[in-house]
Image: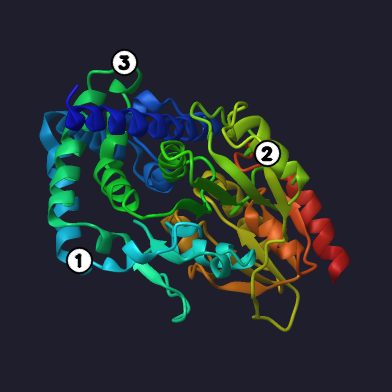
Amino acid sequence: MDNKIRKRLRLLAHYLAATKNEIAVDESVYSLCACDPSKLAYAPRPAKFLSFIRSSSFFARIFIQVVTLLWRMGLDKCWFLFDFLRLLIGKEKFDLRFLSLPSDKPVALAFSPRALSVLESVDALNHSSCLVKGPGSDGLVANPELTLLDYSSLLTWWDCVQALRLSFFISSRMGHKAAFKVWRLQSYTAFKWIVFYLAIEKIPSHKFVITDHYDRWAVLIDRLVAENKAQSGLIIVQHGSLVGLSSTSMEATFSVKIPTRLRSVDKLYVYNEASAEVFRKYIIFCGNLKRDLDIECFKPKISLTPVSSGFSVLIVGHAICENFHLFLYDRIMSDSSIDFFYKPHPTVSPSKEVRARGWHMIEQADFFPRVDLLISYPSTLVAEYEGSGIGAILHPLAIQPEEYESVLSKITNKLQSAK
């Protein structure tokens, strides 16, 4: 078989394996929201537009269905072409420094600005040869002493063209595979995924440090490491809670069935042994190529900023539990002397109803107020605030209306005892 065809089929297999995990996560969110994905044309990342759908349900569903139809008729190619042109316009100059990176030191990868602080919390950057900024890491500002490379600086013009052609091929193939046909909109990530793969495989070292657990980026790096078994390795730093989304405690559980497990992990930095067990049981393949898994525990930390002289409460928001938070505001916050702060999920915009309420809205992703109490679903912030001695009252992410009064009672009792 021709090498080009072999590579194309290999990348197709890797991308589909990564997309299976993204679909599994989306299915779990649809299930939590008691929403049939077929009614939203199997749209990806449902949590991102839940608030919009609630405010204009009929028009939102029509819009998504039209987009899905157009995607099959060629909108996917327009989308990839847009990604291609945007990359070429913003692409950094080809940087030959990557060729001189030592092959015995790991390379840290960041796919969001938050990844930097997570990597710093375990001192991973001091043991890495460089930090590579991936898609989604715009706004990341690192120490000037650190070797920082943008993934686009590893790409040639021809690499970008190849990624565009491969994204056309992959999206088309997804439309002919039964497992992906209804989820074809998931292919919107194809160009960025492929072009990053083409960039990162050039680096001499195939030892990587990432903060992704099981998403498309984690699978990408895991597969790349598996193809270079002799001198390769994968270190994962836990970046968030592994608690089941329907849980009411911070005990590590897992509610998503991951189809594509990781095979090349040789070290984990985790919050506790329970989190390590979740990785072993649900995320890492039982026949992991790196059989001697090294585990190191650490406490997640954040920098808190004083914001109030009186008693204050932070509500950790998410589109899935917005109705409950609006209920809380109407019942106890609107006429309370307590300072209430609301911090929405950094990747999910709050609805107009949430913005219209009188709490202090905090939308800066890296700003964390020092408060006296958290009201939250089992999020990462619960563990991070706990590290500063601040407790929380928990509720399920997909809390049901019949549970509202029970949680409200706990909150009012806590607030009364604090007065």
**Mark drawn on residue 90:** 1
Q: Is residue 395 visible?
A: no
Q: Of the residues under marks 2 and 3, which one precedes in the sequence? A: 3
Quick one: label 3, few (<14), some, or many (20+) residues within 10 Å? few
Q: Of the residues under marks 2 and 1, which one precedes in the sequence? A: 1
Where 274 sits versus 12, above or below? below
Q: Amino acid at mark 1?
A: Gly
Residue located at (77% from left, 66% from top): 390
Q: Nearer the viewer, residue 44 or 11?
A: 11
Q: Quadrant of the C terminus?
A: bottom right
The quadrant where residue 118 appears: bottom right
Q: How is the image coloured?
A: rainbow
Q: Nearer the viewer, residue 358 or 155?
A: 155
Disc 2/disc 1 C-alpha distance (Å): 42 Å
The answer to the question of whether label 2 and label 1 lie on touching residues, with beta carbons closer than 8 A, is no
The answer to the question of whether label 3 and label 1 lie on touching residues, with beta carbons closer than 8 A, is no
Q: Is residue 239 visible?
A: yes
Quick one: label 2, few (<14), some, or many (20+) residues within 10 Å? few
Quick one: label 1, few (<14), some, or many (20+) residues within 10 Å? few
Residue holding disc 3: 178
Disc 2/disc 3 C-alpha distance (Å): 37 Å
**Mark drawn on residue 322:** none
In the rendering, at what x and y percent does residue 47 appear? 45, 43
Q: Residue furthest bottom?
A: 309
Q: Amino acid at mark 3?
A: Ala
The quadrant where residue 14 appears: top left
Residue holding disc 2: 292
